[in-house]
Image (cartoon, grey):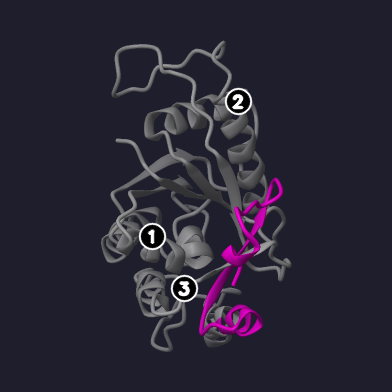
Amino acid sequence: MKLDILAIGSHPDDVELGCGATLAKEVANGKKVGIIDLTRGELGTRGTAETRDEEAFNSAKILGVHARTNMRFADGFFKNDKEHQIEMIKMIRFYRPEIVICNAIDDRHIDHGKGSQLVSDACFLSGLRKIETVHKDESSIQEAWRPKTVYHYIQWRDIEPDIVVDVSGFMDKKMESVLAYKTQFFNPKSGEPETPISSKNFTDSIEYRARNFGRLVGVEHAEGFTVERYPAVDSLFDLK
């Protein structure tokens, strides 16, 4: 299946938190969107790998994405090495996305920056035809494919974005997809240990960050991204 956008996160819920509203908007605009989770989040303090699997499935249905898969890399211990790059190249060539969106370039959780660089490197290497790969669902050598651009969403740390996307009207869908991860986020009835993302303050911060990005560009809500090359427009009038 060829996708327009492939969003990738080190853990289930990374994508929803980082760019859920953007994905919901693009799905509504008729784009084909997919999600890849690198790990099952099995080292997470709350919930289990099995509950995260179920939550990721439910969240994907809420966003309306066309595909979601999990690489089952080792949570906390996967590496940006040849073995993992080859597996990512297979997926990039399988889905042939025009745009890849992945983890923040630097963040509190060690898997985020690591996953960001792994995906970025794999996107480049995927365009080299002398690297031969075969996807498990295909019988022939895959054709080289390099996405047109790679964007990085913003996570725990307040990284200054290079671009922001107007997601007004899609924050409710984003929040619904985030809160599908019932084991992970604020629940006053939960008896599980508190974590940095289980507080009401964190849940509230998802909304007020989007409102702040929106305020700065004159819209209700926006999501921010960093880029790997200069963003280009045909005309100054393309900018809001």
Q: In the rendered structure, which disc, 3 or 2, sits on the residue that comes first in sequence?
A: 2
Q: Which residues are magenta?
A: 211-240
Q: In the rendered structure, which disc, 2 or 1, sits on the residue that comes first in sequence?
A: 1
Q: CA distance from mark 2 to mark 1?
A: 27 Å
- Tell me the residue that label 3 is attached to: 167
Q: Do the residues bearing badges 1 and 3 touch, measured as CB atoms within 8 Å?
A: no
Residue at image coords 61%, 54%: 233
Q: Is residue 20 above or below residue 122?
A: below
Mark 1 lies on a secondary structure that is helix
The kind of residue on which mark 1 rests is Glu
Q: Which mark is residue 162?
A: none
Mark 3 lies on a secondary structure that is loop
The kind of residue on which mark 2 rests is Leu
Residue at image coords 62%, 64%: 154
Image coordinates of residue 79 in percent, x first then y, are 63, 36
Does residue 164 appear anywhere in the picture? yes
Q: Is residue 221 above or below residue 34?
A: below
Q: Which mark is residue 125?
A: 2
Q: Is residue 203 above or below residue 37?
A: below
